[in-house]
Every structure is written in C-alpha cells, then in structure tokens.
Amino acid sequence: MTDDDTRDPRDALPVSRRQFIRITLSGSLAAGVVPGLPAAAASGAAVTYPTIDVAPLASIKPGMPIAFTYPDASSPAVLLRLKNSAPGGVGPDASIVAYSTLCTHKGCPVAFRPERNLLICPCHWSSFDPAKAGQMVIGQGSEALPQITLRVSGMVVQAVGVTGLIYGRETNVL
C-alpha cells in the first residue's frame, strides 16, 4: 500500500464542495435552467398578457359570479363584485375582483359560495377569501389563488394580467 492509497480522494479535488455548488448554481441561473423557476423568470423576459373584455360594468351584480377564461382557454377564472372594496379591486367602489378557479392544492375547480363569501374547493375544502386578495383561510391550498389583474376601459371590465402562478404551470402565458 502506497501513500497515494491512504489519502482521502476528496483532497485531490481542485475546488471545495461549497465552491462547486456556488459555481454550479451560478451557471444554472445564467443559463436559466434552475428547477422550479419559470423560464421567463429565469431569463428576466417580460411576460405579455392578452387584454380581454370580461363583462360590461353594468352587468356585474354583487354575489353573482361571472365565469371566463384567462389568460387562455385552458385557464378558468371567475369575476366577482363584492359588497366592499378589495385589494386589486376595480370599478366605482373597487369591489370587482377576479381569480383563477384552479385550487392551489391539487388544481380542482373552486366555486364562489355567496352565503359564505368564499371561493371553496369541493375536493378537499380549501377556502379562499376574495375580499383578501384570494388568501387561503382554511384547508390545504399552498398559497392564495392567483388574482387576475383587471381594469375598466370605457364601461367594460377587462382582464390584463395575473398575479401569482396558475396551478400546474411553469408560466401563466403558454
């Protein structure tokens, strides 16, 4: 047995583990391939959302949900007029909001329950408060529902973006 056979093989590495991890992570970030990060986020590219007309302002009644899809046909959403103003709300009293209806737990479709003023998932009963930016109030959802960014143009409510990541996607715009 020689001296070379008794040495720890890690001593022969030109860089430490910490240096190796730092170099690998830096390279991955630069290449935009870090797992879990959307490609658009990793590249710094701006996401361009479509602008769609959702409903005439006068037709949106309190407690009566309006279903639509945004930002594409595979993304169900709901528009609501609440009793009071809400974060991200639009309209004369800032009470009109919209959310993705895909639960953040398993992607089941949530539904608005006007008697409880909540968006509730029938699969595992996660409940989200539309008056508090879609915040989860009970259940197994992992985060708030993605909120659809709205604006009023003329007398029409339009969807113009999404805050948060729609369930099951790496990016909101495919």
Image: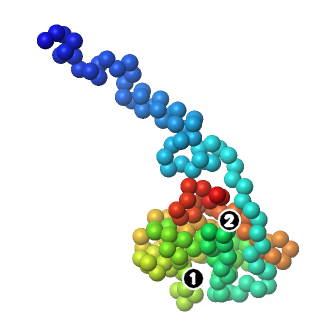
**Dot 1, how many residues are within 10 Å of its Cα: few (below 14), some (14-19), or many (20+)?**
many
| Cα–Cα gap, marks 2 and 1 | 20 Å
Whole-percent x, y for residue 45 in the image: 68, 46
Q: Residue at x 54, y 48 (%)?
A: 37
Q: In the displayed structure, would residue 113 be above or below residue 109?
A: below
Extreme residue toward the left, this view: 1
Compared across the picture, whether 110 is left or right of 96 comes to left
Q: In the displayed structure, would residue 169 be above or below residue 98?
A: above
Q: Secondary structure at mark 1?
A: strand
Whole-percent x, y for residue 132 in the image: 57, 72
Q: Which residue is mark 1?
A: 112
Specify the amino acid type for callout 2: Pro
Q: Which residue is mark 2?
A: 71
Q: Which mark is residue 45?
A: none
Extreme residue toward the bottom, this view: 115
Report the front residue among 126 and 2: 2
Compared across the picture, whether 121 is left or right of 67 comes to left
Specify the amino acid type for callout 1: Phe
Q: Residue at x 22, y 16 (%)?
A: 7
